[in-house]
Image (cartoon, grey):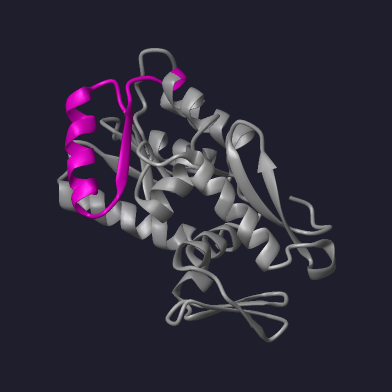
Amino acid sequence: MRIAIVDDDEGVIEFAAAALSAAGHACAGFRNGAALLAALRRQTFDLILLDWNLPDSSGMELLRSIREAVSRSTAIIMLTSRSDKDDIAAALHAGADDYVVKPESSSVIVARVQAVLRRAMPSAAQERVLQFGPYSFDRLTERVLVKEEEVALSAKEFQLALTLFENMHRALSRSYLLETIWQSSADLSTRTLDMHVSRIRTKLKLTPENGYRIVAISGYGYRIERFGAEG
């Protein structure tokens, strides 16, 4: 999973990033709110670790901005030295998924992150076979059926298609998809991603007749939509 760590203390960023990277997550650090908001315009994160006291804004202001204008689905954990019960309640009411008072051990931070991500991910993520209308994805065999007929996809095409379907209506940035599918954000041309999207759009017949479509988001990435549904 991709995690953003927002803290004005570089030491905190490095501490959390080291623990989370060891647990298999990709981390990016930001020293202020403006840097995070700029990144969110071009990147997708599964979870944000957010400090309360930032040089250009409060974590609460940033939390509200993210929830109101950027994303209601991205998980957010407050990671702050403020331990007042009223502060904790205010953050949770404003949309935080959890609240961790620092200093805290790396093992607890990782455990809290993992727990929030489990709650945030669709319950279907644990199932072997996923069904989306006429589309059936078998995780174990990496087979796709469309209206009960198998469609041949490469391993990367399967992973890309499944990632888009599992994040229905959620805009996923190019960097997120490159890191998730190819474990690369810089060494691979985004043209590779575009070609794979084009192939799965054609092979899976993502058309109004089948109820789903892939939408390209200029300057950002892609999302898959259920046709006719509000997104």
**Residue 21, magenta (yes or no):** yes
Q: Nearer the viewer, residue 192 or 178?
A: 192
Residue positioned 42% across, 81% down in the render: 140
Q: Is residue 189 above or below residue 223?
A: above
Who is closer to the viewer here, 64 or 48?
A: 48
**For residue 57, above or below residue 215:** above
Whole-percent x and y of residue 57? Answer: 44, 17
Q: Quadrant of residue 227 in the image?
A: bottom right
Report x, y in % for residue 43: 49, 36
- Residue 178 in the image, given as x and y percentages of width and height: 44, 47
Left or right of 63 in this view: 179: left
Left or right: residue 120 versus residue 88 is right
Would you say residue 45 is visible in this rendering?
Answer: no
The magenta segment: 7-34
Question: Residue visible at 58% across and 44% down?
Answer: 72
Q: Residue at x 70, y 48 (%)?
A: 215
> Taking 88 as reference, is 215 above or below it?
below
The image quarter in which residue 118 lies: bottom left
- Place residue 11 in its image quadrant: top left
Q: Does residue 47 show up magenta in the picture? A: no
Q: Furthest-bottom residue in view?
A: 148
Residue 123: image x %, image y %? 51, 70
